Image (tube, rainbow, N blue to C red):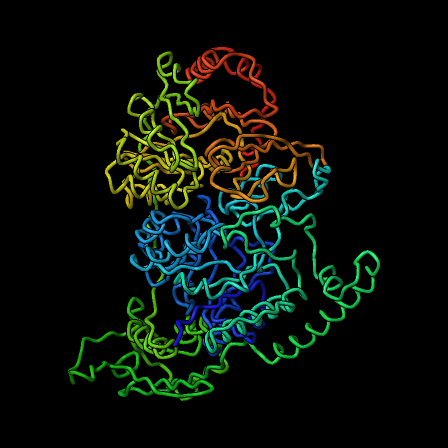
Amino acid sequence: MKREIELLAPGGDIDSIKAAIVAGANAIYCGLARFNARNRAENISFEDLNGILRLAHESNCKVFITLNIIIIENEISALIQLLNKLINTKIDGVIVQDLGLFYLLSKYFSGLNIHASTQLTTHNVGQIKFLSRLSATRANLSRELSLGEIKELTLTGHQHGVLTEVFVHGSYCICFSGICYFSSVNGANSGNRGRCSQPCRGQFLTTAQGKDFPLNLKDNSAYYDLKELSDTGVDSIKIEGRIKKFHYVYTVVDSYRKQLQSFYADNELHLDNKDLYTVFNRDFSNGFLKGDINKHMFIDNPRDNSALHYSKINGVAFAENTEKAKQEIYDLKTKIIANVTKRIEQLSIAKVPLVITISGKAGAPLKVVVKTDKDSWVVLSNINLVNSKGYQTNISQGQKSQKQGNDKSNGQCLNHELLLIRFKSLYDTEYFNKDFKTDNLQSDLFIPFKELTRIKNKIYFILNDSREYVYPIDVPRLSRLRQVKIQPTLSLLISSQNDLPLSRETSADIYFQLPNSLKGNRLEFIDLFVKNKKLIPWFPSVLIGEDYHAAVEFLQQVQPKRIVTNNTGIAYEAYQGGIPWIAGPYLNIVNSFSLLCLKEKFNCYGSFISNELKKIQITGLKRPDDFKLYYRIYHPIVLITSRQCLFHQVTGCKKSKIDDACIQQCEKSTSITNLKNSSLLIKKLKGNYHSIYHETNFLNTDIATDLPDLFSSFFVDLRDIKTDTKIKIDKLKLVQLFENHLKGKPNSTEELRHRISPTTNNPYVNGI
């Protein structure tokens, strides 16, 4: 019998959740009103959650809650309140991006299974080990990975108690998830906060290749690849679509369920995917999964492709029959919607009725009869009831105890209102109060509060499948360190050997940017760092497969005094090897518990604070003891990092697909302009993936005076990435200007702004 793979479906609203259930999903992921990465979805209320859990579990379907955004400091209290509620539900897991939330869950809420969101950009085996140390039980892998890369990560995951999950259908992002800042910088709508406005899907001025939507990828579909995915050992296949409608969810889940059933039963796959084309799609590609990253993965239309496809399969030119094709596909969708509506309207997320009857008299136990729609039982107190002037007897010991009287610290006379309050938490479950009867309870009776609590907890235990009630956890507040005077230093980031003389002409620390691909020139970089001991390695966000292993070998051989890494796989290796490491700016660190997580779990030396934060959001951060904070005050703003070739749709390329030579040797740049006449720089450097940069560089001269005595060092990025920002002096004089600025020398700030222009500090002004 074949190993079965979990089919994981999106649930953007209640109807979509019901549609996924009737279509045969094994699990559903859905978000609440806050803390999830699809705030444009309708999402569900906490009041509906328990009913949804009951409905799903009755159909052997799991439910995972998305808490997959970065959490800013002033939200921590509300987050903890939510966790205290979720711990007493039957949710099957929480999906997480923020490292501070990982810390809170693993330390205080260990009863919740932790799933690592795709926002963590998990793409190498070191990152799997990093997540395992954070108590993750599952990792959603990056969408850009091939079958072979998925297999390697899955094997490592299983060795470290981490299941793997792979997206198989729905929207492709042009950028690696979690390190896209396009929407954040352009419109103050951070993708890391669930507010992505999808500017990459927008229209641009027509490119040389005649494309109006040059960054628009087709949708992902692994419909024909389930055999190969099974061979990788992956545990779950995930369908994207929490902002899609319920008929979309039903159609896609139903198609994949039937495909899986055919594979399990006959080792065969259906060869017809026409149903997938009847609902929203941008046509389909499996290029990343097959390791065939080609120009045919693009489509110059971000809108629904279903009518166009319908006309093609019927052999009719779309231009000649636009309205007819649209009408026919509309009629087909209407039929699907009616069919699914009929099926889901029979499902209810209403809570189960609960009737509690309480009775008792002096000298006898308190009797509580609990009745649901399926069962009933009796719970008795362990001690007898007494009136306010009497004595209570411990039944189990048969002895009299001290007179309790009417001591309100231990209890008080029972009445209907008091008992309803004491049993209120039973209704925060999948049950509602149909009737609460106390008619047969004598008046003027007493029982200690702790005995009422024991009875309530026993009822809760029975109602909730032998799960103990977890009392609210009061997470200790983090205290701010005693303020000490800090004179911040200046640090420089370079990526060219031409800038090495700066290390002899300035006292600033010099960090050298390593490329995404080290496998072809690892020895050259090892030699560079061995010969230049003052250089400090700066590792990029993305290191896949052999390039990751080459980076690990580099780290082991060079044994640098310190590193900056934007990749948690390298962070894990540095931690294991005792090498001091700094969490880079693309790890999206925005709260104090994330800092504590890095320090306590991985002995981190220090961390950058995300450039997405504004002043007030940084102010509340509490730095751990013996821990340094860093901030980039000047740098080109990377909006997108992509494994795809961004020149195919813009200037064209003689190659139809990416190969190793492209990554190692290609070096070119171009630009695209949106309809607001803003230009974006597309840049490909040797050894690196394609990137898009904002038209002007980031310059924040205010932070040094806005937040004194917080940061140990401010970074200036001197890499040769040409945007519209012009620097009117040489690099050494620029460094001297920045040093003067940090020392507070008169006119240095004004001169910096004059010498570097135009620039923006919008992220610092707008925040997230």
Q: Measured along the vertical axis of the image, is residue 51 above or below residue 223?
A: below
Residue at the image point whose x is 56% and y is 74% from the top: 23
Report how many numbered discs are placed on residues in the image.
0
Q: In which quarter of the image is residue 586?
A: top left
Looking at the picture, how far across and down is residue 340, in whole percent?
64, 75
On screen, residue 220 versus residue 500, left or right, reads right
Q: Measured along the vertical axis of the image, is residue 713 above or below residue 369?
A: above
Looking at the picture, how far across and down is residue 497, in whole percent?
41, 20
- Pick the residue in front: 85 or 726: 726
- Pick the residue in front: 246 or 70: 246
Q: Quadrant of residue 155?
A: bottom left
Q: Measured along the vertical axis of the image, is residue 40 above or below residue 581?
A: below
Looking at the picture, how far across and down is residue 76, in whole percent?
43, 49
Residue at the image point whose x is 42% and y is 18% from the top: 499
On screen, residue 56 versus residue 246, left or right, reads left
Residue at the far front: name it: 654
- Pick the residue in front: 189 or 273: 273
On screen, residue 362 versus residue 184, left or right, reads left
Residue at the image point whose x is 42% and y is 63% from the top: 86
Looking at the picture, how far across and down is residue 172, in whole percent?
57, 52
For the N terminus, which image quadrant?
bottom left
Residue at the image point whose x is 26% and y is 36% from the top: 556
Q: Measured along the vertical axis of the image, is residue 360 above or below residue 145?
A: below
